Image (spheres, rainbow, N blue to C red):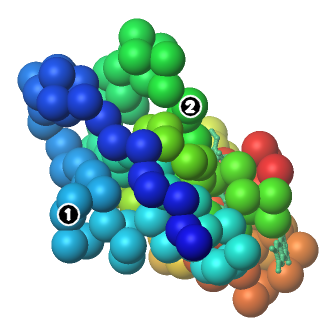
Amino acid sequence: MAQAPTELTGDQLRRLRETFAGDIVVPTDAAYDGARRLWNAVHDRRPAVIARPSTSAEVASLIRFAREHDLELAVRSGGHSPAGHSTCDGGLVVDLSRMRGVSVDPATRTARANGGALTPDASGYDLTPDARSGHDRRDGDRSAAGRAAG
Ligand SMILES: Cc1cc2nc3c(=O)[nH]c(=O)nc-3n(C[C@H](O)[C@H](O)[C@H](O)COP(=O)(O)OP(=O)(O)OC[C@H]3O[C@@H](n4cnc5c(N)ncnc54)[C@H](O)[C@@H]3O)c2cc1C
């Protein structure tokens, strides 16, 4: 039998909505199952809340919220972590799917990618094959950040 999800208390949810203006999904929302689902169905976890920040300041406020409320925190970019580190049970998932910006400055030969940027987000730039797609060109929905963190 599936374990009941750990939910935020009413006070916690109110506090989260006061400090975070972005989109959040909780277990009572119709979108919850879709929002928590990962590419690898083995990691069938039930976070208390999934939040989708759009700025680094919003990410910071979510980290503060998790710390203040002693919640497990998981960060998700492409969601392909073989170990399932991009989700959790009963905690807060920071879903970076709204932070996919990429910019390239050819003069300084510098590329910057937001935490949720996936391989196709860099497809408009003439980057080296390694920078474009790691060691396998099929990995279109994985992120540079996720690859770096494992
Ligand atoms: C079947 C399979 C095939 C694979 N093939 C390849 C391959 O061909 N080439 C390759 O390079 N890799 C491959 N990998 C490994 C893959 O690159 C890593 O699992 C990578 O972590 C997935 O990236 P993601 O964006 O999906 O990460 P996620 O699952 O979103 O995250 C992975 C880890 O990074 C953390 N994380 C993600 N984004 C951030 C962030 N912005 N800030 C801080 N922490 C963050 C997460 O919390 C998690 O711990 C493969 C994995 C699988 C399961």
* Neighbourhood count class around disc 2 (C-alpha, 10 Å): few under 14, some 14–19, many 20 upward: some
What is the residue that sits farthest to the front in this orientation?
1
- Could you tell me the amino acid type at mark 1? Asp
Q: Tell me the quadrant of ligand 1.
A: bottom right
Q: Is residue 87 visible?
A: yes
**Residue at mark 2: C-beta within 8 A of ligand 1:** no
Residue 29 appears in which quarter of the rendering? bottom left
Q: Residue at x 72, y 58 (%)?
A: 84
Query: In the image, residue 110 lies at what x, y percent?
Result: 62, 44
* 46 vs 59: above or below: below
Residue matched to label 2: 72
Q: Residue at x 25, y 71 (%)?
A: 31
What is the residue that sits farthest to the top in this orientation?
68
Query: In the image, residue 150 lies at what x, y percent?
Result: 81, 51
Q: Earlier in the sequence, mark 1 or mark 2?
A: 1
> CB under 8 Å between callouts 1 and 2?
no
Q: Which mark is residue 29?
A: 1
Give the secondary structure at mark 1: loop
Query: In the image, residue 126 lies at what x, y percent?
Result: 63, 73
